[in-house]
Amino acid sequence: MKKSARAAKRNSPKKKGGGTKAGKPDAPPSRLIDSQIKAMPDWRGETLARIRSLIRDADPDVVEELKWRGVPVWSHAGIICTGETYKKVVKTTFAKGAALKDPKGLFNSSLEGNTRRAIDFHEGAKIDDTAFKALIREAVALNTAAKRPGRKA
């Protein structure tokens, strides 16, 4: 009796080492994010580094990951936000941004959706540190509230 290809793959020994899906060496996501920032020696790298610093200040327990072909993702009981770099903008997308209060009006992109909201940072833009950290803390509170026992997520 032959095993199906799926069963054979599922039961085969796991490869150790050798790298990630993209063939890059295994490394902690934080180091890979460091490398991404260093690879952008212009305003985009500086902006992403500043955003990352603010996120870490706002939530010392934040988990850094890379997803979707190398997009930095910050999580705490679920995704808080992502940090994407483009030619003319650094975009921070909040996974549950539509549910967050934004009294300072930081959200300026992806406003039409029912779930996500984003902040586009352009070259020379000033980041309101206090308001940005407040959004991070509120996103963490929303994620952790959804994970409490007896609550529906």
Image: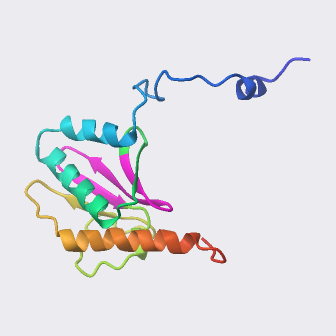
Q: Residue at x 23, y 45 (%)?
A: 86
Side of 62 where 150 appears, left or right: right
Does 52 appear above or below 38?
below
Q: Residue at x 25, y 69 (%)?
A: 132
Side of 128 where 117 appears, left or right: right
Q: Quadrant of residue 26?
A: top left
Q: In which quarter of the image is residue 80?
A: bottom left
Q: Which residue lies furthest to the left in this view?
A: 124
Asked if the magenta segment contains residue 56, the reply would be no
Check the image and tell me how it is coloured: rainbow
User: Is residue 9 at all visible to an observer of this figure?
Assistant: yes
The span picked out in magenta is: 72-93
The majority secondary structure of the magenta stretch comes to: strand
User: Is residue 106 at all visible to an observer of this figure?
Assistant: no
The spot of residue 121 in percent (x, y) is 19, 58
Q: Which of 144 and 115 is in front in this view?
A: 144
Quadrant that contains the C terminus: bottom right
The spot of residue 1 in percent (x, y) is 92, 17
Q: Residue at x 32, y 38 (%)?
A: 31
Q: Which residue lies furthest to the right in this view?
A: 1
The mark total stands at 0
The spot of residue 53 in percent (x, y) is 24, 56
Q: Residue furthest top?
A: 1
Asked if the magenta segment contains residue 85, the reply would be yes
Q: Quadrant of residue 39?
A: top left
Q: Residue furthest front?
A: 60
Q: Residue at x 50, y 62 (%)?
A: 77
The spot of residue 61 in percent (x, y) is 40, 60
Q: Which of 2 and 150 is in front in this view?
A: 150
